[in-house]
Amino acid sequence: MRKFKTESKKLLDLMINSIYTNREIFLRELISNASDAEDKLYFKSLTDKSVKLKKDDLVIHVAFDEDARTVTVSDSGIGMTNEELEKNLGVIAHSDSLEFKQAQEAAAQEAGDAEGKGKKKPAASSVDIIGQFGVGFYSAFMVASKVRVVTKAFGSDQAWAWESDGVEGYTITEAEKEGHGTDVILTIKENEGDENYDTYLTEYGLKELIRRYSNYVRYPVQMECMHQRKIEPEEGAEGADENADPQWETYFETETINSMVPIWKRRKQDVKDEEYNEFYKSQFHDFADPIRTITVHAEGALSYDVLMFVPSRAPFDLYSKDYKKGLELYSSNVLIMDKCEELLPDHYNFMRGVVDSQDLTLNISRETLQHNSQLRAIAKKVESKITSELTKMRDGDREAYEQFFENFGNGLKFGIYTSYGARAAELAPLLLFYSAKQEKMVTLDEYLEAAAEGQDAIYYAAGEEVERLSKMPMVTSVTGRGYDVLLCTQDVDEFCFQTMMQYAEKQLLNVAGGDLGLETEADKEAAEAATEANADLFAAMAEALGDKVVKVAVSTRLTDAPAALTAQGPVSLEMEKIMSQMPDAQAQAIKSERVLELNAGHPIFEVLKQAQEGGDADKVSRYTNLLYNQALLVEGLPVDDPVAFSQAICELMK
Ligand code: ADP
């Protein structure tokens, strides 16, 4: 017996024990896998002459045996070798990425919580976790006490059987199987309390599930269905009585249960939302409904149908290097490519969907794709359609849009950043940021609409959390003047704003940056006067700080805080923080030009002045460092020498 990996086992337990609301999707998952396996063989046949497929070769078969309590899903697809069985079914999540670990911890915790309260019902997020890792196959254990997979890889002579009761581990042994493909045999659980599993052992129950969840699977999903017919009494047979009850006999006939009519060819008004949702979940292996369904039907010189979905949450690997964007590409209902990258711009990489055009040639290959003008025309339409649908969602269903933005908003910002602002006209209106004044997410247009009279710029601050940012002296100094500030908490925000530079002809200004142009003439004069009058003090302070800052100056904007750190030049403190965490040494070396700004109206400034006038150079130096370190803390930056800082404070308290 081979053991499941620990993390797999935890997830498996969680799934088997806590998610029972939607057990019936197991069949959809198995049929999707079967369909994928047939796709793989079909693809192979396009390039590999040794694969000879006949028209009816690729079918999916569902069967049940009431007495043995089994349901079998069979495909004639690509099958799996011994190694593939081990790799694909031996672990649940093939990725040991950070996301996986985090999600798994959360799942474990949730499972623990649920246990504690004696509850069985899962929180929505545990469903999310399971869906996120494509544990499709394992959903079989929600209804089965044992799962046996008999498979033979295409081109191999040896079949293998994988078997597991879903508890500790699994076995893999040699097996017999005629053709290539896979049979998944579930031994259905016994009924338990009000859990009725018997419906999966009926023709009616299985047909229902196939129609509901797998109607649009490309391959015929077939079952041997029971029929009855009247037995006609033989003519003139002895004892034939015209008035006797008719006799019936039972016979079986192979039926195709799913409609297979491509859903994308149907008009949107004729398709129920539910049908779209089921298609999405079955086709794209998601457990959650999409947040938006988008269709395009184009006719004319270039005819095509597009059916796209905005997922309701990001797949776990969206931001990983391995993530592949793309839409499925069909030519007259025949799949040509399962992820056609050319159909989606990077910033819409999260979209899932299908493009079908009879006008595309079947033998379109990766190499010729980029030069295919028809494909480019479709891609252009796809992009503009996504943009317009997102715009509609932004204006018509804000709640859904905010959820969308939480998941995929960073991608839009990256789109602006990586295009050096070229995409800003299209994407910037879709962005949302947290408004300090309105205390909610707003678009840049909404920010400007609510802007104070005469406000000439868009102000923003970047940091880790809204809560903390809203209290930063540089933020309050701007909000204190009645101006709103966008509180940006994503690493990409500032980079995005810097490439945009402006929006609707208003400059985007970081409140912690240099000159905001907000101070009055009187402020400026006062600051200049204070600078001149205290030239000695500033010189002493600058010396005390050495190369930690480029300048110590009187602030024209601080109101309550005694001092604050700002940065002059293009690199802000927040950007420096982000760069310092990048793996790239060059990025790490990028430093901001720090300025220690002092509030000349603050009592602490008086203290410093007196120390300077009294010739107490040591005190000036100590206090300057205290102020500097304090300002670092407010900025969320690490203090250079925490021990020295703490000692200096104790010294003061003595
Ligand atoms: P997913 O389908 O999301 O990748 P699953 O847990 O459902 O996740 O399946 C894991 C892997 O096992 C699949 O990616 C596929 O490689 C393999 N697999 C599952 N079912 C079949 C099948 N019927 N035929 C061939 N391979 C299969």
Image (tube, rainbow, N blue to C red):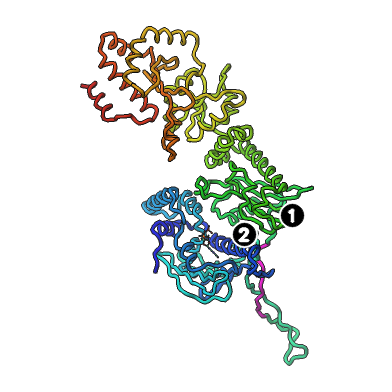
Residue 559 image-quadrant placement: top left
Magenta residues (range): 249-259
Residue 555 visible = yes
Looking at the image, which is closer to me, 275 or 549? 549
Instruction: Name the residue carrying label 1.
Output: 358
Residue 204 image-quadrant placement: bottom right
Check the picture and name the quadrant holding the C terminus.
Answer: top left
Residue in the picture at 42% in, 51% down: 104
Looking at the image, which is closer to me, 129 or 515? 515
Q: Give x and y (percent) for residue 526.
A: 43, 8
Q: Tell me the mark number nearer the camera, choosing from 1 and 2.
A: 1
Q: Residues within 10 Å of mark 1 (few under 14, many from 20)?
A: some
Q: How many marks?
A: 2
Looking at the image, which is closer to me, 396 or 492? 492
Above or below, comparing residue 609 to residue 263 in the picture: above
Q: Give x and y (percent) for residue 231.
A: 71, 82
Q: Is residue 454 left or right of residue 295?
A: left
Check the picture and name the quadrant holding the N terminus.
Answer: bottom left
Q: Earlier in the sequence, mark 1 or mark 2?
A: 2
Q: Give x and y (percent) for residue 514.
A: 47, 20
Q: Is residue 588 left or right of residue 42?
A: left
Residue in the picture at 44% in, 60% down: 91
The stretch drawn in magenta includes residue 250: yes
Q: Give x and y (percent) for residue 496.
A: 54, 32
What amino acid is found at the position of numbered circle 2 in the picture? Arg
Residue 194 visible = no
Q: Are marks 1 and 2 in contact (CB under 8 Å)?
A: no
Secondary structure character of the magenta stretch overall: strand
Q: How far is disc 1 from disc 2 in space, using C-alphas?
A: 28 Å
| Residue 212, label in figure | 2
What amino acid is found at the position of numbered circle 1 in the picture? Gln
Determine the secondary structure under disc 1. Answer: loop
